[in-house]
Each structure stands twice: as structure tokens, then as C-alpha cells.
Image: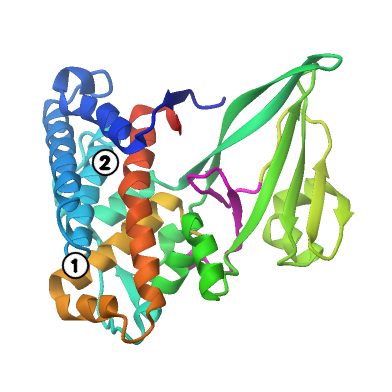
């Protein structure tokens, strides 16, 4: 069953996201979701603190923003944990659940983030293994009469749960909003493959779809990486890409590894290991952790990065990520804690 969709018309999505998140600062509202008194207090205080951290981040430079955004993320992560698991033993939430180190300005993208045995990330990541994808389907009622509807599909990405470390380069490559910037900078991105789905619902209730994708993989390799596509037939195959067609079925089968940019653009996640098959929420959490770690413990290093004396493309990547994450992470959390899918029509 498709998730309920909240379509908000606004010229300020960020403001609206926090308007709805702010509902969770009131125990009378949170009581609709959980009854545990301690958990209710944890949720309300965490969301209040998160908003303050995000608000403060607007008034400081990029040398400090990652710290404030990350601590805001921690509070939002804890609010989700207490909503989903009200009786969790708080000893499991001691520490970040992550560690950094060995970072240099010369090899920033080659840095690694390590997962510890316990901590907030361990608990948070168990609850955030889905990428929720907003599709548009064309619904045919009779003959040529049709209309468009929005439809949410959950793409489960749980492989990373057993990973012990993540490379920073791969995490940046997995942020779909950065895809065009990487292309401009000449940084090859083999982890994301642009794709598009045209979906039809027929009068008898059956679905079919056309999927277009650029040719980063051969057809056999594509179907091996995304076995769900074995249910699709090839409609076109040219030098630029494939068009694959599914037959009419009661339920559509999508590749499980898909991520969506805030623009609506879709990408297949071409993961060659569990370490880079990661859900969108966790990519943001991991990257902001590393940036905050550098800002807290290696501030001169962050200054070197932003001076741009070496590898100046890192400046653009960090700025674009932070700019994206400040709105996208709270929105994705809002989807999770509300049980709805929020989309903003600017």
C-alpha cells in the first residue's frame, strides 16, 4: 500500500518542514504515536534542540556549520529512535556510533569513517534502511481518459548494516544532488546511474512501466546488478542507453537500490559492495559526522580545505552537500516520524 502523501505548496520548503516537525515538540501530539512518558519527553526535547541547532547554524561560517548541523541530526535521530523503540535502553545510545581519523587535506576523499559496536548510528541505521521514492503514474480509467497520480514506493537498502567502515569519496558519490557538480568537476561517478520510469495503471488495475537508463553498464551486467530487471524486456538499445519495458502485472517490481534527488531525478545505486549500498538518510548522517569531526578536532585542516590551496573541488563538494543536507535530512526524518511522505511544490 502506498504511503500517504502530503503535498505542500510553498515557496519556502525549509520553513514548512520545521513547521510540521515542531508539532513533535508537544507531548499532546506525540501521544498519538507513543504512550511511554519518558519517550515522549525525549522526543519533544530532542526536536526542540534540533531546531535550535539548525537555526544557529545559519549564523555561522562553514568552519562551524557542520558541528551544529550534526548535533541537530543527532537530536532528530534520537527522536526517531524513541518514537520507534520507546523502551530502548539508553546505554545503547551512548556515543555517536562512529569514529573518524587519519584525515588530511590532500587525501580528504580517501578518508574513512569507522562504525563502532554501539552508539546512536547503530540504532538509527536499523530504522532507516529504506529510500522512499516518489513516482508519478498515469492512471487510465477508460479508453483515452487518464489522469496523473503521485505514488510512493519503498526501496529497501539494508546491505550496509553489516559494514564496518565507509569511504568518504563513495559517500559523496551517493548524494544525487551532487551528481551534476561531480560531472562538471570531472570526477567520475560510477555509483549512480541516471534513470527514469514512466508508469501506467490500466483500467483493469494492472501496471506496466518503461524504464530508461544511460549505458554505464552492459545489459547483462545491468540485470545482474539489479536482478529485478530480469522481469523487463528490452524495448530499445542504442549507444546512449536502454529502454526496458515491464509487462502488465498486478504489482510493479522496481530495483531495490534507487535514490531520488530533491529535484525528483532518479538514480540506480550501482553498488559493488555493501559499503556503498547505503540509504540516503545514512549517507547524510555519515558525511555530516565526518565534517563535524574535522571541525571539532581538526579545525586547521578544515581551514586548509576551504583555503583551496590543494584539491579546491573539495570546497564545492562540501558546500553543496551541506546546502542540500540542511533541508533534506530533516525532511526525510519528518517522513519517518510522521508516517507520511512530504513533498513540496514550490
**21 sits left or right of 284 in the view:** left
Classed neighbour count for the residue bearing mark 2: other residues with Cα under 10 Å, few (<14), some (14–19), many (≥20):
many
**Label 1: few (<14), some (14–19) or many (≥20) C-alpha neighbours in 10 Å:** some
Residue located 14% across and 36% down the image: 48
Among the two numbered marks 1 and 2 on one chain, the one whose residue lies closer to the N terminus = 1
Q: Is residue 221 left or right of residue 128?
A: right
Q: Position of residue 191 (x, y in %)?
A: 57, 66
Quadrant containing the C terminus is top left
**Badge 2 is on which residue?**
81
* Residue 139 included in the magenta stretch of the image: no
Magenta span of residues? 255-276
Compute the Cα span from label 1 to label 2.
29 Å
- Between residue 41 and residue 60, name the one nearer to us: 60
Residue that mark 1 sits on: 63
Placement of 9 over or under 310, stated as above or below: above
Q: Give coordinates of residue 25: x percent, y percent.
A: 16, 28
Q: Quadrant of residue 28?
A: top left
Name the one closer to the observer, 11 or 188: 11
Residue 116 in view: no
* Quarter placement of the N terminus: top right
What percent of the width, then of the height, locates residue 268? 62, 55
- Tell me residue 249's x, y (percent): 78, 30
Residue extending farthest to the front is: 11
Q: Which mark is residue 225?
A: none
The residue mark sitting in front, 1 or 2, is 1
Q: Is residue 206 visible?
A: yes
Image point 22% across, 23% down: which residue? Answer: 30
Above or below — where is 16 with respect to 284?
above
Is 263 magenta? The answer is yes
Amino acid at each position: 500500500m502506498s504511503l500517504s502523501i502530503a503535498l505542500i505548496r510553498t515557496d519556502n520548503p525549509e520553513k514548512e518542514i520545521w513547521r510540521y516537525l515542531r508539532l513533535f515538540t508537544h507531548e499532546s501530539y506525540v501521544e498519538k504515536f507513543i504512550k511511554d512518558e519518558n519517550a515522549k519527553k525525549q522526543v519533544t526535547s530532542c526536536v526542540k534542540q534540533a531546531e535550535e541547532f539548525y537555526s544557529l547554524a545559519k549564523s555561522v561560517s562553514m568552519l562551524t556549520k557542520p558541528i551544529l548541523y550534526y548535533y541537530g541530526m543527532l537530536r532528530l535521530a534520537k527522536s526517531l529512535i524513541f518514537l520507534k523503540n520507546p523502551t530502548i535502553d539508553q546505554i545503547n545510545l551512548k556515543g555517536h556510533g562512529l569514529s573518524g581519523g587519519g584525515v588530511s587535506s590532500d587525501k580528504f576523499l580517501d578518508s574513512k569513517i569507522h562504525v563502532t559496536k554501539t552508539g546512536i548510528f547503530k540504532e538509527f541505521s536499523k530504522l532507516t534502511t529504506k529510500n522512499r521514492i516518489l513516482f508519478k503514474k498515469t492512471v487510465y480509467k477508460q479508453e483515452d481518459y487518464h489522469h496523473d497520480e503521485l505514488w510512493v514506493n519503498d526501496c529497501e537498502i539494508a546491505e550496509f548494516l553489516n559494514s564496518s567502515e565507509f569511504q568518504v569519496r563513495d559517500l559523496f558519490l551517493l548524494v544525487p544532488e551532487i551528481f551534476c557538480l561531480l560531472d562538471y568537476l570531472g570526477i567520475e561517478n560510477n555509483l549512480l546511474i541516471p534513470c527514469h520510469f514512466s508508469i501506467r495503471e490500466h483500467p483493469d488495475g494492472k501496471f506496466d512501466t518503461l524504464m530508461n537508463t544511460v549505458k554505464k553498464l552492459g545489459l547483462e551486467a545491468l540485470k545482474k546488478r539489479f536482478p529485478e530487471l530480469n522481469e523487463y524486456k528490452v524495448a530499445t538499445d542504442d549507444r546512449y542507453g536502454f529502454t526496458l519495458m515491464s509487462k502488465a502485472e498486478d504489482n510493479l517490481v522496481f530495483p531495490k537500490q534507487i535514490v531520488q534527488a530533491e529535484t525528483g531525478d532518479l538514480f540506480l545505486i550501482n553498488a559493488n559492495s555493501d559499503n556503498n549500498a547505503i540509504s540516503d538518510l545514512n549517507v547524510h548522517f555519515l558525511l555530516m559526522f565526518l565534517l563535524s569531526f574535522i571541525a571539532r578536532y581538526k579545525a586547521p585542516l578544515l581551514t586548509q580545505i576551504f583555503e583551496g590551496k590543494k584539491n579546491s573541488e573539495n570546497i564545492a563538494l562540501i558546500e553543496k552537500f551541506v546546502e542540500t543536507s540542511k533541508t533534506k535530512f530533516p525532511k526525510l526524518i519528518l517522513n519517518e516520524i510522521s508516517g507520511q511522505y512530504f513533498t513540496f511544490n514550490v
